[in-house]
Image (cartoon, helix red, strand yellow):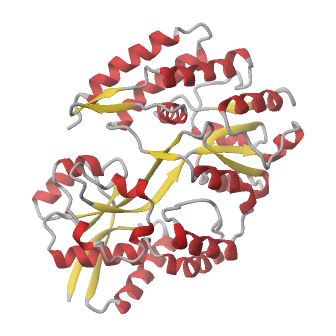
Amino acid sequence: MVTITVNGMPPKTQPVDRKYFEEDVKTFEKEHPKIRIDAREGQMDPKTFSAKLAGGQLEDVFYVYFTDPAGLIQRRQGADIGAYVKDMPYYDQIKADYLKVFTGPDGRLYGLPNGQYSLGLVYNRALFTKAGLDPDRPPATWDEVRAAARKIAALAEGTVGYADYSKNNQGGWHFTAWVYSMGGDIAVKEQGRWKAAFDSVAGRRAVRMLQDMRWTDNTMGTRQLLQIEDVQKMMGAGKLGMYMAGPDNIPTIVKQFERKYEDYGIAAMPNGNATLGGGNGFMFNPKASPEKIKAGIEWVQWKYLNPERTEFEDERASGNDVPIGLPLDRLFTGAAAERQDTAHRKYANVPQDNYKPFAEGNARLEQKVEPPNAQQVYTVLDGVMQAVLTKKAVDVDQVLADAAKKVDGILATVK
């Protein structure tokens, strides 16, 4: 008998999710009589992580965001699990992009993904139709986004073709996605050190496209310094054609503003290069015994990476007003992905055809994660977005050069 401590249990403020989690623990233990789960709330907190590890308080299996593994691996704060996943069910069908997040410079594996998101283009299908655009064929390039935004903005005064964020680090987050979509990077590692990389052809293309839509076309509206809640409100009011977001934004709009799922679609990130993706997963305590690591992998696979349970989970969720059929958490390829897709189609309560452009296009894009020290970098890049969207005569080259110097300083602290 082996007992493993795991975190990631939903808090009591999420009673339905907590109930499902506790049910799953009981079922897992019944099916694995030699393993006991000691489940705890919470996730990996960078402020307390090292102290918990040194003091023997760190869980055997701990929840991380995709921005965490690189630093943890470098500091030897995660266990090498490569020897234990060879026989793991469906391991060979997990997308390589997500396993790469947990792979160290030594080529060894230090964790497993359990959820992911990718940014795309959420759009109002009704406004597309009114503007003479085909809602089943959304823009596939930024030039097409620009052209569609002009048609939508021309429908009526106060209607915005395309909107974007520019404060509270959300502008920097989206600028990162813009640069990725143009084929560039925010930061690169050269000779063991990180440096800013967005003062580039891709960075200038992103800034100038935003400039053109904001000031030449006047399709982004006069109100700026927006964040996610502002843009969702515009979309929920039927006054916005498009904005950059993940599929999870759609149920938020539908529920908060009493809209219909049929009103919205989502397309893949324009230009066909790459999209900003993020997510989460689990790593393993470097002090855990081989038996605990093996048991932890069995738990993570059974609970989070198990296409065989998808139909059960969809059926269970279908009675609780949970949207089923959104293109979320597509961690698998091949037969595993098809098995999940079949279950989602069976229990779908949202219009899956509206999301085909995203699902099909996204599968062809490189999924790039956030840069190191992402939130500090985003604070600087907020300034880039704000300058472009609020100052008509801004010097693009100077704005990018100044921001790059600041980001170089932030990246110099990355270890």
Rendering coords of residue 85 (x, y %): 30, 72
Q: Write the residue at 75% across / 54% down.
A: 258
Quadrant occupied by the C terminus:
top left
Residue nearer the viewer, 113 or 91: 91
Q: Is residue 267 above or below residue 201?
A: below
Residue nearer the viewer, 226 or 395: 395
Rendering coords of residue 288 (x, y %): 16, 70
Residue nearer the viewer, 261 or 414: 414
Q: Write the residue at 37% across / 60% down.
A: 281
Rendering coords of residue 122 (x, y %): 67, 45
Lateral position of residue 14 relative to residue 28, left or right: right
Lateral position of residue 226 relative to residue 301, left or right: right
Quadrant occupied by the N terminus:
bottom left
Q: In which quarter of the view is residue 164 placed?
A: top right
Rendering coords of residue 8 (x, y %): 36, 66
Q: Is residue 70 visible?
A: yes
Q: Is residue 48 visible?
A: no
Lateral position of residue 122 relative to residue 333, left or right: right
Q: Write the residue at 51% across / 65% down.
A: 333
Q: Is residue 17 above or below residue 386?
A: below
Q: Write the residue at 31% across / 56% down.
A: 102
Q: In which quarter of the view is residue 23 placed?
A: bottom left
- Callout count: 0
